[in-house]
Amino acid sequence: MSLKINPWRLLLKAGILFAAFNFAFTMLPTSSGNSVSLYNNLVPGRERLPFGENPTDAYNLSLFDIDAMFASHIISDGLKSENEYRVVIVGDSSVWGTLLRPEETLSGQLNALNLTNADGKNIQTYNLGYPTISLTKDLLVLEKAMEYKPDLVIWMLTLESLPADKQLTAPLVSHNPVRVRRLLADYELKLEFNSDALTHPTFWDTTLIGRRRSLADWSRLQFYGVMWGITGIDQLYPETYEPAKIDFEEDNLFHDWAPSELPLEELAFPVIGAAYSIAGNVPLILVNEPILISDGVYSDIRYNYFYPRWAYDQYRNVFSDMSLENDWVYYDYWDIIPVDEFTNSAVHLSVAGEEILADIISEMILFEAAR
């Protein structure tokens, strides 16, 4: 006796099962996976956080899942050794290393020095820089980095990361609204005036269908990890590029602000205070990163594309004063790199420029590690 199957009933049951699975998916964490990753297992961990717009050529891509990003990084490769003194460096694309291979970046060159602290522990440095300039973006990265038990945190920053209207517009920030709103509440950060920049996930966004983009990005990151493991390539390395500007118009504005004083209430210095709270007992060092100092047309008005002299000079004075008032550990290395050791931006260094910086930062690490 043959069993007769009603296709309409079968289709209805399949639809009900799919709907049930789809909405049951909302009970799962929104992260793709802190622990589920090919990296540090079947393929080596990346030496910098994933970022890229040309994945088929660079074997890298940008995504917004912070847990998945860290799971792909070499810092997630097992437990911290008892013989390791762990240093993490947080910052923008200058730390991440635009146009530089992993071993040429600040962290790469520091590791090549084979430093040890006073107790004989190996000083291992991890590159946790991420392109886009925003203190709040760095705060997100720092909060996650603290799960990996660093002994020292170095935060490379610059004036361009401070304007309050930039804090929530960085893609990594705007696509992590739950994390960001919790940080804003926990540390009483008054950045709500542009909170519309944050995405507003709906219930549908938490379903399987709603999360298909993030899951697809996670899958692609795993796929490109195989090519990263084979080639070591994680960004495009063009033979030529547009060099950083050294000639300017007669313009002294900074973010539509004219001389003579920076509006401190519109600069996100309180985010730095929140970072110290997150770091807790772990030493946190602030470094005003090197900038290009132009000698071209109207260089008497502007240091570079980002900064008119009046604004940057005030920023340095204010930062120094606030560091003293708040007991922040602050180093100012703004002018240590020659103009010809910058590449395609006023904050991106050449290999030789990174070597100069690494020599100075290594001395700073040894000093701070001995305190």
Image: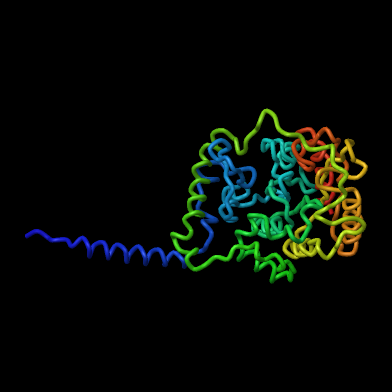
Q: Residue 109, located in which quarter of the rendered image?
A: top right
Q: Is residue 318 left or right of residue 241?
A: right
The one of 81 and 255 positioned closer to us in this rendering = 255
Could you tell me which residue is drawn at 17 percent across and 61 percent down?
Answer: 5
Where does residue 311 sit, x and y in percent of width and height?
88, 53
Could you tell me which residue is drawn at 58 percent across and 66 percent down?
Answer: 200
Q: Is residue 49 left or right of residue 315?
A: left
The quadrant the C terminus occupies is bottom right
The quadrant the N terminus occupies is bottom left
**Rendered position, 255 above or below 200:** above
The one of 30 and 339 positioned closer to us in this rendering = 339
| Extreme residue in the front direction | 250
| Extreme residue in the left direction | 1
Could you tell me which residue is drawn at 70 percent across and 54 percent down?
Answer: 150
Q: Is residue 122 visible?
A: no
**Rendered position, 194 above or below 229:** below
Where does residue 112 sit, x and y in percent of width and height?
73, 36
Q: Is residue 136 left or right of residue 299?
A: left
The one of 241 and 359 positioned closer to us in this rendering = 241
Q: Residue 257, located in which quarter of the rendered image?
A: bottom right
